[in-house]
Amino acid sequence: MAKRGLAVLLSEANHARLHAALTLACAAAALGRPVRLFFHGESVAALTPERHWQGDIAYRAAGLPSVGELVDNALGLGVVAMACQTGMQMIGINAASLPEGVEAGGMVAFLADARDDELLMG
């Protein structure tokens, strides 16, 4: 029997929330569960490699991965990721700026793709 997918809507550029949601996505993907992420609004900033999160300092000191490393890990585990087009405009990036494998899209497309998935707000 196929495992039910997990769809996570990341809603803000808050380090702790992003870190928790990305950790959850990586754990679920590592267990073989299909996972998709939607970076909504300012959370799209997590997809920009030049963004340095203040919270990463404490997390790295504790031996934990940074937000950027979690994004890379998630993509490496086959997590499907979509960046909100409005969020991209808000932070001043375009689709060419997104990491390889991340597509630009909207909420309707995300929800259509996640139709039968468990939906969580991150």
Image: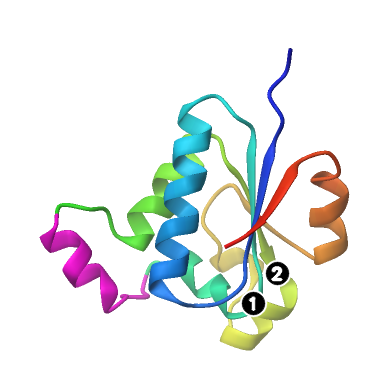
Q: Position of residue 114 (x, y in %)?
A: 79, 46
Q: Check whether the beta carbons of the residues at disc 2 and disc 1 lie within 8 A of each other.
A: yes
Spatial distance from mark 2 to mark 1, Cα to Cα?
Answer: 6 Å
Read off the residue under disc 1: 88
**At 47% across and 53% down in the image, what residue appears?**
22
Circle 1 SS class: helix
Quadrant hosting residue 83: bottom right
Mark sitting on residue 84: 2
Please state if 81 lies on the left or on the right of 27 as rendered.
right
Does residue 56 belong to the magenta stretch? yes
Residue at x 22% of width, y 53% of height = 64
Q: Is residue 36 above or below residue 84?
A: above
From what the image shows, is residue 10 above or below residue 50? above
Nearer the observer, 37 or 23: 23
Q: Looking at numbered disc 2 in the image, what kind of residue is underneath it? A: Cys
The residue positioned farthest toward the top in the image shown: 1
Q: Position of residue 122 (x, y in %)?
A: 57, 63
Depth check: 8 or 78 in front? Answer: 8
Left or right of 20, for residue 106: right
User: Image point 88% across, 50% down: which residue?
Assistant: 112
Residue neighbourhood size for the residue with mark 1, other residues' Cα within 10 Å, grouped as few (<14), some (14–19), many (≥20): many
Residue segment shown in magenta: 50-62
Viewed as shown, does residue 119 lie left or right of 70? right
